[in-house]
């Protein structure tokens, strides 16, 4: 699991974390996934990751919720997902997916902020 020190630091910055939560809610809601858990998230990678894994496990098995729809909305492609799952075979797949979601949502927030400041 690469680049975690940077992610851990970024998720501790309040305004960046607030923007991360807003983007996470948007992506989850537009994929018809419950997003009520996002309000209670605490800053920091470990807290976000643990909560996200729990939510994915709880909701990923429901037939009316499609995990691939969520991943597509967040912009995590099937090839990227397969590659990451293969690289981390010993990990629970929900842990790997949660990390990908955190990285991609944070990346979206940082890119938006960068271009707004230009």
Image (cartoon, grey):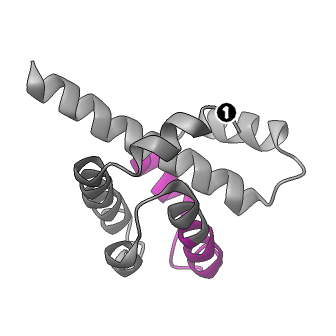
| Quarter of image, res 49 | bottom right
Q: What are the residue bounds of the magenta stretch?
A: 51-74
**71 and 101: which is toward the camera:** 101
Give the residue at x 69% y 62%. Answer: 94
Q: Quadrant of the C terminus?
A: top left
Asked whether residue 1 is drawn in magenta, I would say no
106 vs 66, left or right, is left
Secondary structure mostly seen in magenta is helix
Give the residue at x 88% y 47%. Answer: 89
* Image location of residue 92, percent across then percent down: 80, 60
94 versus 72 height, above or below: below
Q: Is residue 2 visible?
A: yes
Asked whether residue 60 is drawn in magenta, I would say yes
**78 and 28: which is toward the camera:** 28
37 versus 108 height, above or below: below
* Image location of residue 66, percent across then percent down: 53, 66
Give the residue at x 29% y 40%. Answer: 109
* Image location of residue 32, percent across then percent down: 37, 71
Badge 1 element: loop
Q: Is residue 75 visible?
A: no
Question: For the view shown, which residue lies furthest in the right direction?
Answer: 90
**41 and 30: which is toward the camera:** 41
90 versus 34 height, above or below: above
16 vs 70, left or right, is left
- The residue indicated by pointer 1 is 2
């Amino acid at each position: 699991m690469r680049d975690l020190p940077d992610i851990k630091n970024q998720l501790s910055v309040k305004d960046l974390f607030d923007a991360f939560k807003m983007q996470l809610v948007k992506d989850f809601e537009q994929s018809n996934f419950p997003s009520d858990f996002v309000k209670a998230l605490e800053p920091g990678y470990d807290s976000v990751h643990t909560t996200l894994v729990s939510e994915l496990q709880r909701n990923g098995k429901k037939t009316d919720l499609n995990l691939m729809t969520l991943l597509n909305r967040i912009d995590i492609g099937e090839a990227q997902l397969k590659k990451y799952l293969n690289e981390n075979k010993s990990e629970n797949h929900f842990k790997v997916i949660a990390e990908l979601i955190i990285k991609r949502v944070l990346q979206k927030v940082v890119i938006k902020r960068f271009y707004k400041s230009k």
